[in-house]
Amino acid sequence: MEKNPFDLTTEQINEATRSLDHMDSLEIVTVMNREDHRVPQAVEAVLPRIAEAVDEMVETVRQGGRIFYIGAGTSGRLGVLDASECPPTFSSDPELVQGIIAGGDRALRFAVEGAEDSTEQGAEDLKSRLFSEKDFLVGIAASGQTPYVLGALAHARQTGAKTVAVTCNPGSEAGHLAHLAIEIDTGPEILTGSTRLKAGTAQKLVLNMLSTAMMVRLGKTYGNLMVDLKPTNRKLKERARRIIRLATGASCEEVEKAYQAAGGETKTAIVMLLSGMDAELARSRLKCAGGRIGGALRD
């Protein structure tokens, strides 16, 4: 049963900030900082649920499925942001992790009035991307009762796909509808109802964990090095060279030679330097090892 919006935790009055409009600048940012300290603790309380979601996402990708984030307003923007960072960070196919926001791309910059109120549109936006039982849906809604997100979650369940809800109101409608509920109790906002604040921060932390942990589990790192980044600009090319040096201990000259021979493929260059293989063999070994450097070196 849908809750009265004013009964939601995120809509309650924060007693620590009742006199917010009488505070000076330092007092305002101090109380904001104090409240923000509560967010990591709230996230820590749901780490087992986050880990469970990661396991489901990894299995989805291994079975050929895709990951979708869907939300409205701040929640939708955070989902699109996290999804858009996956290709440059992990060289993943842009189709693998997709972010959908109510109102479409225009809603990334401007408020699209009423976009979040349609359950039908949430379902339609998934259908337009041929969402199937092989895929995985992450519904993001601070309130846990955004109609657009509920419609998407309901459609995903009907297709037989796995779903997770990321909300900041325990016992939410979205949490009940999803297979797995990640409900972060961030408490009342310092500015009543402004869920771009603590709730948004919590959602950002959770999405960072979901995508990063999934990619690590899928072999996109070597130790804690970002070896599968896509070097599309000068900064990233220099980062790729630095990562190769850190992974291999090779000299700048050796790194440059391997980097060029590998065609700018960071992992290939690392395997070459650590094993003495040429680029073709290193690339082949990586493919056989599912992209894992450790596996390519052991084969």
Image (spheres, grey):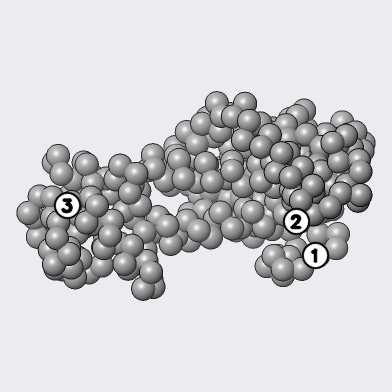
Are there few (<14), some (14-19), or many (20+) residues within 10 Å of tag 1? some
The C terminus: image quadrant: top left
User: Quarter of the image holding residue 162?
Assistant: top right
* Mark 2 element type: helix
Q: Which residue is mark 3?
A: 249
Question: In the rendered structure, which amino acid carries the disc numbered 1?
Answer: Ala
Check whether the beta carbons of the residues at disc 1 and disc 2 lie within 8 A of each other. yes
Q: Which mark is residue 73?
A: 2
The image shows residue 92 at horizontal and vertical percentages of: 41, 57
The image shows residue 86 at horizontal and vertical percentages of: 47, 56
Q: Is residue 224 visible?
A: yes
Check whether the beta carbons of the residues at disc 3 and disc 1 lie within 8 A of each other. no
Depicted 23 relative to depicted 11: above or below: below
Q: Which residue is mark 1?
A: 111
Q: Residue at x 28, y 49 (%)?
A: 291
Question: In the rendered structure, which amino acid carries the disc numbered 2?
Answer: Gly
The image shows residue 98 at horizontal and vertical percentages of: 56, 56
